[in-house]
Image (cartoon, helix red, strand yellow):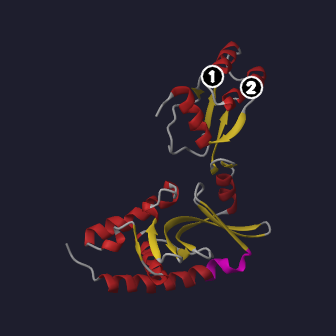
C-alpha cells in the first residue's frame, strides 16, 4: 500500500477547493441571496431572496464547536440523519486505509482551520462542486455541495415532507383518523414498511385501522364512502412508525 504524505495531501485539497469555490461562486453567486436554509430530511440546502430560490444537494461533513474547540465528524453524530452523512463515511475509510487517525476518530480537539482542511479533503473524495459553512455563533456546520437541483425538482422533493411539532421535518405519511388515537386499533398498510426505508417519489407510507379495512372490503376498495370513514390525516414518518409499533410491536 502506497503511503500518502498527509500534510501535502491536505494542502493540495485546500488549493483544489479554493479553485473549485471560485468556479462555484462565479456560476451561482450564493452570496447574492438574502436567506439560506438547510434540511437534513430532504438533503437540500436552499438559498433564497423572496420567491427566487437556488437549491443544492449537500453532505454534512462535520461540526466545529467554537466554545470547546472540538471537531465532530457527521458519521459519528447520532443527531445527523443518514440522508446527509452517509457519503462522509468515505473519509473514515480513507483514514483507516492510510492510517490518519483524525479521519477515523469521531470527536477530538481541533481548530476552524483544520475543519476547512477536513472539508477540502471531503470535497475531493466525494467529488463535490463546492463547500458551505452556514453562519453561526458557536457551532459551525461544514458542508460539501454535490449537485445543483433545479427549482421544480426541489419543490417536488420538499412537497414529500411535512413539519411535525414532535419530530421536526420528516417524510409525509397518511393514516386514518382512528390511528391518531395512538392505541391498538389494528394496522393495515398499502405495502410492507420499515423505518428509514428508501421510497420512490411516487410512493407514500399509508396505513389504516381494522375498522377501516372492514369498510374498505365492503366497498370493494377505496371509494368516497370508505375514504370518508377513514378520514385520512397527514403525519410525519416518525409518527407513522410510532403508531405501527403501538399496534404491532414490530421492534
Q: Position of residue 214 (x, y in %)?
A: 66, 15
205 relative to 72, above or below: above
Side of 80 relative to 169 (left or right): left
Picture quadrant where residue 7 is located = bottom left
The region drawn magenta spans 26-34
Q: Position of residue 120 (x, y in %)?
A: 45, 78
- 152, 218: nearer the viewer: 218
Picture quadrant where residue 121 is located = bottom left
Q: Nearer the viewer, mark 1 or mark 2?
A: 1
Residue that appears at 67% across and 40% down: 235
Which residue is situated farthest in the left direction here?
Answer: 1
For mark 1, give the secondary structure.
loop
Q: Which mark is residue 227?
A: 2
Residue that appears at 70% across and 26% down: 178
Q: Tell me the residue that label 1 is attached to.
A: 185
Q: Main secondary structure of the magenta part?
A: helix
Amino acid at each position: 500500500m502506497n503511503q500518502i504524505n498527509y500534510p501535502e495531501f491536505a494542502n493540495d485539497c485546500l488549493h483544489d477547493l479554493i479553485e473549485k469555490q471560485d468556479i462555484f461562486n462565479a456560476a451561482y453567486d450564493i452570496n447574492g441571496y438574502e436567506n439560506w436554509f438547510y434540511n437534513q430530511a430532504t438533503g437540500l440546502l436552499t438559498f433564497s431572496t423572496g420567491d427566487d430560490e437556488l437549491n443544492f444537494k449537500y453532505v454534512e461533513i462535520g461540526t466545529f464547536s467554537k466554545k470547546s474547540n472540538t471537531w465532530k465528524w457527521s458519521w459519528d453524530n447520532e443527531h445527523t440523519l443518514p440522508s446527509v452523512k452517509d457519503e462522509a463515511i468515505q473519509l473514515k475509510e480513507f483514514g483507516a486505509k492510510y492510517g490518519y487517525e483524525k479521519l477515523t476518530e469521531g470527536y477530538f480537539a481541533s481548530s476552524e482551520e483544520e475543519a476547512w482542511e477536513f472539508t477540502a479533503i471531503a470535497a475531493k473524495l466525494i467529488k463535490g462542486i463546492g463547500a458551505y459553512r452556514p453562519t453561526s455563533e458557536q457551532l459551525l456546520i461544514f458542508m460539501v455541495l454535490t449537485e445543483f437541483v433545479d427549482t421544480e425538482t426541489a419543490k417536488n422533493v420538499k412537497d414529500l415532507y411535512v413539519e411535525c411539532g414532535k419530530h421536526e421535518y420528516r417524510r409525509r405519511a397518511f393514516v386514518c383518523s382512528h390511528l391518531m388515537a395512538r392505541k391498538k386499533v389494528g394496522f393495515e398498510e398499502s405495502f410492507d414498511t420499515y423505518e428509514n426505508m428508501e421510497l420512490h417519489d411516487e410512493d407514500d407510507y399509508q396505513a389504516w385501522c381494522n375498522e377501516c379495512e372492514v369498510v374498505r372490503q365492503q366497498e370493494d376498495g377505496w371509494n368516497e364512502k370508505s375514504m370518508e370513514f377513514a378520514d385520512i390525516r397527514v403525519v410525519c414518518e416518525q409518527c407513522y412508525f410510532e403508531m405501527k409499533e403501538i399496534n404491532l410491536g414490530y421492534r
